[in-house]
């Protein structure tokens, strides 16, 4: 028998009425398939005035997953009132019907920026349209970050809808934490893995600059017509990518965009609008334009123009005012451009309203045609009442005809005397005017002065009364019209608020019921042990081994412990070869000779140094004394004051807890992982830099003072944190004074009389030179300091390689 939810989903069709009893929607047409589900155009039939909306009906793969419906409901309830912006798609509510889950959004046209990219049609946008699209998108992202206090994290073309007349409509705020664990379940994969920043492969490290990187990738694709990364490209690909300047950008713009495309966060602008300001601050205000409607375009057809993205002015003043427009007000005439046949446009922050151009027919134009305009303003002055001294008059180049002279200002001045003329002359001229037009009216008005005084007095009173009555009538009409408009507006607002309150109360009631059910379930299971689950983006080690297939390089995983809980996060390090030792001639003798090492098999290395939290669990389980934290704190800080023997004992306990061969890394494995495919002095370059390592001279917050919580610095290209600095790390090898007899297969150096072990990486106490990947030191296996710690390694079975 078919599943009822599958039957309901398959039965969606036009004119079907769906939704709970208190809020119903009638489907009009299916707009598109989205990675989140099906997008339908529908009519909200529960409102006073039926309104067209878009319904995003979640995929069954999401609905079936436990907890997704509750998470989406809470998210919509939280965001519906917080996110109010013209370029963020408004979400009206979240609903359930026959096992289906869906959200109601403002009317979306269904076309996304991803559609334009996939059909290679974004190149048809002109520069002004591209600028307008990026500006609107930047405003939406920054507004969401400001109101929610966290980045969008999913910024990608398939979440950017383009509405005719409304421009950009961004969706997806808050979705990442829900989607990340479920990506493998979705039949249609989203775009965001191809647009995320390097740090976004570790979602907890994302900031506003992560969205800047995604916006920069979109801008680069918009101008170049090429996608920078594929979904399979990982974090390392972001560091290897060398971008080339696309067409349509000058040197200054490309310099700004290339900084935003940096794999490091610091060079990027602080916000999306900061990037847009840098890109378009020197541009002139763009003409108002339209984006071609390409939804139904076939390859051979000419796209039809529809109102689209409002090109917010990229001029510096317009951007700084955040949507201030530079169009003439309705009371002013529109400025004449180089192309007077183009329509003028009134720009708002939400849409573009285009006025119809004036007809080319000169009969309908305002004012005289150009050839009838006065040819010169240097016409003879009116004759004075007394003859002045003769003045030389320049001879005109051509004798104007009578009609031209009739229309000149001077000729009109002869008919209408100026104030400088004698009053008697003016009166005489008026008496000689014919009884037509103005002269006739003046004559009639003067005749009224001949009426008897009582008649004139009553006439004036009657006129004043009539004028007062008319003025009072119009004032009353305007007043009551304003009152009616205000009452109507208040009534509509109250109706809308009532609907929203009703929906909010119903949503809260449903949420309360679900919470009560969850509370009952938790009470019933209170005595059952709760097992930890791997973090988002971290795989289960047992699941990877049971899959019996090779694991992708740099995959993160965790093993479960027999006593409950999880082991450290491990990263799969690929097989390869590298040159080991002092490659630049600025190291010590014990770093020579440089020799090639071949790592023939992949292995796993801890993503972070072992923390106090992880080590304390081992110490409590085995009865060992807890190491001193120097008063700096425990938790996620790296464990310190541990010897090589302590570190080795931890790996043996972890191997017993997991049944896997955990150990300390060899010296060659450590340097190979620390370099992460680079041959520079440090993995990030040849000079110390802020934000890459905790050492005395590398970092101003912790360097020279104390340890930092693990992961506080940027990871290297293979996603490993603190390979340089924070704490020195014990490795497996016995110390040798040089590499003369060092193995070239990545194995550890072992001797029968091993008293000193190798320590690598430098610490918060050391200068930058000691934090080089090639640097190495020795210490007795029984000694410990507050700058020494360790990380662990793991051999992978053949099935995972």
Image (cartoon, rainbow, N blue to C red):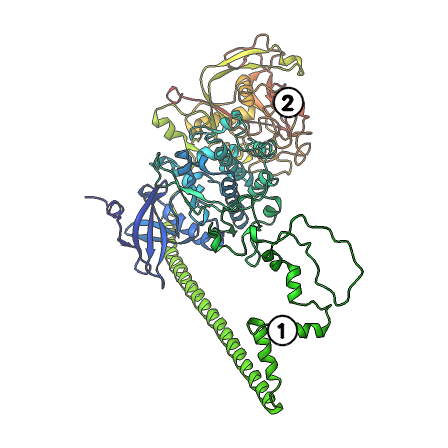
State how far apart marks 2 and 1 are (Cα). 99 Å
Give the numbered dot on residue 374.
none
Upstream in sequence: badge 2 or badge 1: 1
- Tell whether label 1 touches label 2 (CB within 8 Å): no
Query: Mark 2 highlights which residue?
Result: 686
Q: Secondary structure at mark 2?
A: loop
Q: Position of residue 368 (x, y in %)?
A: 54, 55
Label 1 packing within 10 angstroms: few (<14), some (14-19), many (20+): few
Comparing 532 with 417, the one in front is 417
Q: Residue furthest bottom?
A: 454
Q: Position of residue 17 (x, y in %)?
A: 27, 55
Q: Which part of the image, by quadrant, shows the C terminus?
A: top left
Query: Mark 1 highlights which residue?
Result: 432
On screen, residue 381 versus residue 57, left or right, reads: right
On screen, residue 223 versus residue 416, left or right, reads: left
Q: Does residue 624 appear in this view?
A: yes
Label 2 packing within 10 angstroms: few (<14), some (14-19), many (20+): few
Q: Position of residue 251 (x, y in %)?
A: 60, 31
Comparing 704 with 177, the one in front is 177
On screen, residue 331 versus residue 604, left or right, reads: right
Q: Residue furthest left?
A: 1
Q: Which part of the image, by quadrant, shows the N terminus?
A: top left
| Quadrant of res 503 | bottom left
Q: Secondary structure at mark 1?
A: loop
Q: Does residue 606 appear in this view?
A: no
């Amino acid at each position: 028998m078919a599943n009822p939810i599958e039957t309901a989903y398959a039965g969606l069709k036009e004119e079907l009425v769906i939704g709970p009893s208190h809020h119903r929607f009638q489907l009009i047409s299916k707009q598109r398939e989205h990675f989140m589900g099906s997008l339908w155009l529908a009519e909200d039939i529960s409102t006073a005035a039926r309104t067209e909306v878009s319904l995003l009906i979640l995929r069954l793969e999401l609905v079936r997953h436990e907890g997704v419906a509750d998470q989406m409901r809470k998210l919509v309830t939280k965001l519906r009132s917080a996110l109010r912006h013209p370029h963020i798609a408004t979400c009206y509510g979240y609903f359930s019907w026959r096992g289906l889950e869906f959200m109601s959004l403002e009317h979306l046209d269904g076309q996304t920026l991803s559609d334009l990219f996939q059909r290679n049609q974004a190149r048809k946008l002109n520069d002004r349209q591209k600028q307008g699209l990026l500006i609107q998108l930047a405003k939406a992202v920054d507004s969401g970050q400001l109101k929610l206090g966290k980045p969008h994290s999913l910024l990608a073309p398939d979440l950017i809808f383009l509405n005719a007349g409304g421009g950009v409509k961004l969706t997806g705020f808050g979705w990442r934490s829900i989607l990340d664990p479920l990506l493998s379940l979705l039949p249609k994969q989203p775009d965001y893995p191809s647009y995320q920043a390097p740090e976004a492969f570790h979602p907890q490290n994302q900031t506003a600059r992560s969205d800047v990187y995604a916006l920069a990738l979109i801008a680069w694709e918009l101008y170049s017509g090429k996608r920078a990364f594929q979904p399979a490209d990982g974090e390392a690909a972001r560091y290897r990518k060398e971008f080339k300047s696309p067409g349509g950008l000058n040197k200054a713009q490309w310099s700004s965009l290339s900084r935003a495309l940096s794999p490091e966060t610091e060079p990027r602008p602080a916000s999306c609008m900061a990037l847009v300001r840098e890109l378009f601050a020197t541009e002139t205000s763009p003409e108002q334009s339209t984006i071609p409607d390409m939804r139904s375009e076939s390859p051979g057809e000419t796209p039809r123009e529809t109102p689209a993205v409002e090109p917010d002015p990229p001029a510096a003043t317009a951007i700084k005012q955040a949507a201030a427009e530079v169009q003439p007000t309705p009371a002013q005439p529109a400025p004449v451009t180089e192309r007077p046949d183009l329509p003028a446009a009134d720009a708002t922050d939400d849409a573009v309203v285009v006025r119809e151009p004036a007809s080319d027919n000169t009969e309908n134009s305002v004012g005289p045609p150009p050839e009838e305009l006065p040819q010169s303003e240097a016409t003879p002055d009116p004759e004075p009442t007394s003859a002045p001294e003769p003045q030389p008059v320049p001879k005109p180049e051509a004798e104007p005809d009578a009609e031209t002279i009739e229309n000149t200002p001077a000729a009109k001045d002869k008919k209408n005397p100026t104030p400088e003329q004698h009053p008697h002359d003016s009166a005489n001229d008026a008496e000689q005017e014919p009884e037509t037009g103005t002269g006739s009216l003046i004559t009639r008005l003067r005749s009224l002065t001949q009426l008897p005084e009582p008649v004139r007095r009553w006439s004036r009173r009657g006129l004043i009364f009539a004028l007062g009555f008319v003025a009072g009538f119009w004032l009353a009409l305007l007043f009551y019209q304003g009152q009616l408009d205000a009452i109507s507006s208040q009534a509509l607002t109250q109706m809308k608020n009532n609907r929203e309150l009703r929906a909010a109360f119903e949503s809260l009631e449903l949420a309360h019921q679900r919470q009560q059910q969850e509370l009952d379930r938790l009470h019933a299971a209170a005595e059952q042990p709760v097992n930890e689950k791997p973090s988002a983006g971290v795989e289960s080690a047992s699941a990877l081994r049971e899959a019996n297939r090779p694991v992708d390089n740099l995959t993160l995983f965790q093993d479960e412990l027999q006593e409950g809980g999880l082991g450290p996060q491990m990263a799969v390090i690929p097989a390869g070869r590298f040159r080991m030792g002092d490659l630049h001639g600025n190291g010590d003798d014990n770093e020579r000779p440089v020799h090639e090492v071949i790592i023939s098999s992949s292995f796993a290395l801890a993503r972070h140094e072992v923390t106090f939290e992880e080590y304390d669990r081992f110490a409590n389980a085995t009865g060992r004394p807890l190491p001193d934290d120097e008063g700096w704190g425990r938790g996620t800080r790296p464990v310190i004051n541990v010897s090589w023997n302590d570190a080795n004992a931890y790996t043996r306990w972890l191997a017993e807890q997991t049944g896997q061969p955990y150990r300390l890394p060899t010296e060659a494995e450590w340097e190979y992982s620390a370099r992460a495919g680079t041959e520079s002095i440090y993995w990030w370059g040849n000079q110390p830099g802020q934000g890459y390592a905790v050492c005395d001279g590398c970092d101003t917050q912790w360097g020279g003072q104390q340890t930092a919580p693990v992961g506080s610095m940027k990871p290297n290209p293979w996603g490993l944190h603190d390979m340089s600095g924070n704490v020195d790390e014990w490795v497996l090898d016995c110390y040798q004074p040089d590499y003369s007899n060092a193995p070239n297969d990545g194995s550890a150096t072992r001797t029968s009389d091993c008293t000193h072990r190798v320590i690598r990486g430098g610490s918060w106490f050391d200068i930058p030179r000691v934090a080089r990947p090639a640097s190495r030191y020795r210490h007795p296996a029984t000694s410990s300091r507050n700058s020494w710690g360790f990380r662990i390694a793991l051999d992978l079975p053949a099935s995972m390689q």
